Amino acid sequence: MSDDPVLELSGVDSGYGEMQVLDDCSLHLDPEEIVCLIGPNGAGKSTVLKTVFGLLTPWAGTVTYHGRDIGGMAPEDVVREGIGYVPQTDNVFNSLSVEENLRMGGVARKGGLDRVIGDLYDRFPLLDEKRSAKARTLSGGQRQVLAFARALVMEPDVLLIDEPSAGLAPNTADDVFGHVQAVNELDTAILMVEQNATKGLGISDRGYVLDQGTVRFQGDAADLLDNEEVSKLYLGG
Amino acid sequence: MVLAEHLANGLIFSSIIVLGSIGLSLVYSIADFANFAHGDTMTVGAYSAFVAFGLVGGLGGSVLGLPFGFFVALLVGIAVAAVVAVVTEKVVYEPLDIDSIGLLITSIGVAFIYRALIQMRFGADFTRFGIQPLRPIEWLIPYGIRITKHDVAIVVSAAVLVGGLHLLLQHSDLGRKMRAMADNPDLARVSGIRTDRIKLWTWLIGAGLAGAGGVFLGLYNQLSPRMGFNLLLIIFAAVILGGIGSVYGAMLGGFLIGMINQLTPVLSELGALLPLVPDEFGIPVGIEYANAIAFVIMVAVLLVRPNGIAGEAT
Ligand SMILES: Nc1ncnc2c1ncn2[C@@H]1O[C@H](COP(=O)(O)OP(=O)(O)OP(=O)(O)O)[C@@H](O)[C@H]1O
Ligand SMILES: [Mg+2]
């Protein structure tokens, strides 16, 4: 594979109704990378992911995937392109069982659904134990794992994850980050939004700091963590 | 005992209400649409079956006192109601692209159109399927239950349809997708579900069941252009009572509302039924107040459980 970005936003404006959130936002994701998107509440981090995934249509600029424009493509088609998405909230089907959640994750697969779900049960034994439990009965951490596994059923090329550690106890959060790294090692490029910037950048190759819909800083994850200005403004130190 | 008779009637009437309330609830939960044309969709089913029965009524032997032709007509009623609803969705609601309140109001207009078309063709008067009315089943009469084989056919058919829907929802791919969509429409799209298609299937199934309800209502009472519309309010009551957005709640709500409706006369005979209460005691409400009683009970339940019986507790 070439080193061209798998996913690229350039000059994207986007928002809700009349309200603009993203303002000339540009970022990219290279093959096999983990990229972490940080920034204050309301900066537009989730909006970036929603715009990539077709839940919002870019008002201006382009979203390209392997060089092809996917801006405004419907979410059900974006999945079929090979992009997976774990939303920040409401990311499981509460009234469906664990097994049914995983099946829903694979509706666009051409075949091999049982094999992939079997593999996911091997990888996440806690889901295996809870196959027929309704998702609403799971703990926060278990639910996050289910949300993550649902997106993996498609074996995506690129995975967008919105705040995987939100609301989780530190140990559970570390487990989730471990899963993110493990998936990345299977050659899935990951664009992750993370509230816990230190930990998020800690497992990432590169990072972007988003503020008021615009990228303020970008660079190698380690450099961003060391950057005094970033620390002072965005890492609470 | 009179109570048995009312319970039996309640069961028959409930079967019809349940068939109506399922579709209303399905379309509400999956298409986010309170469809006021749902009652008239029942009427469409009834009159389509009426026409079909006129053509094939003489067909074959009989089951539960109904000629085979009736069951063919039933299928025609289901199919026409389903197709009319899907076409309306495609031709009217979908192109309009408005919010759910706009859709609600539009559906009231659609209801008037269905009804006007039926009335233009068939007149405003009552009519009946040309089926010989039956005498009550003999061996039940000593128990005070006067129901016909036709009534049994209604209950059995409704049970089969509801059971079939349950199997579909729980064990088919389409059913799982429908439940997923009712649960979380955005996540459904994100997962790759073609939600537009699921919506059409929902219309098809919901309206088909309504069509069946209409046919049975026509068999139980008679047909008239207002038959479905007259039922719409208590179908809404059933869906709200059960928990709007929950299909199983709609089944339960439909059952309860149908029962309550037919049990209203029992109120005036309370004394005779209850021990320790003088036989003359009773709350004199006629069957004409049945809907009002059903609504009073619905409101009472909602005061305790604002999201309905099967709705999520708050
Ligand atoms: N569905 C919506 N409709 C209208 N405005 C919204 C919607 N979702 C988010 N917003 C607004 O858009 C802006 C950016 O929101 P976004 O969710 O992208 O922020 P975020 O960076 O993900 O924040 P957080 O850290 O809180 O998740 C905020 O002002 C928010 O209030
Ligand atoms: Mg967010």
Image (cartoon, helix red, strand yellow):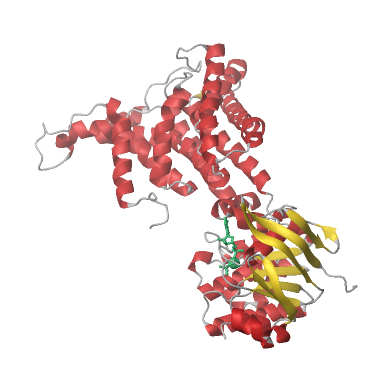
In which quadrant will I find the N terminus of chain B? top left
Is residue A146 depicted above or below B32 in this figure?
Answer: below
Residue A71 is left or right of residue B53, and the answer is right
**Whether residue B45 is visible:** yes
Q: Position of residue B260 (x, y in %)?
A: 31, 37
Q: Position of residue B253 (x, y in %)?
A: 40, 43
Residue at the front extreme, as displayed: A229
In which quadrant will I find the C terminus of chain B? bottom left
Residue A33 is left or right of residue B94, and the answer is right
* Residue A208 image-quadrant placement: bottom right
**Whether residue B67 is visible:** no
Q: Quadrant of ligand 2?
A: bottom right
Foreground pick, B180 / B11: B180
Is residue A233 depicted above or below A13 in this figure?
Answer: below
Q: Position of residue A157 (x, y in %)?
A: 78, 68
Is residue A131 depicted above or below A224 in this figure?
Answer: above
Residue appearing at x 56%, y 28% in the figure: B74
* Residue B252 image-quadrant placement: top left
Residue at the bottom extreme, as displayed: A226
So how many labels did they put on this image?
A: 0
Residue appearing at x 30%, y 29% in the figure: B141
Residue B191 is left or right of residue A7, and the answer is left
Residue appearing at x 57%, y 86% in the figure: A237
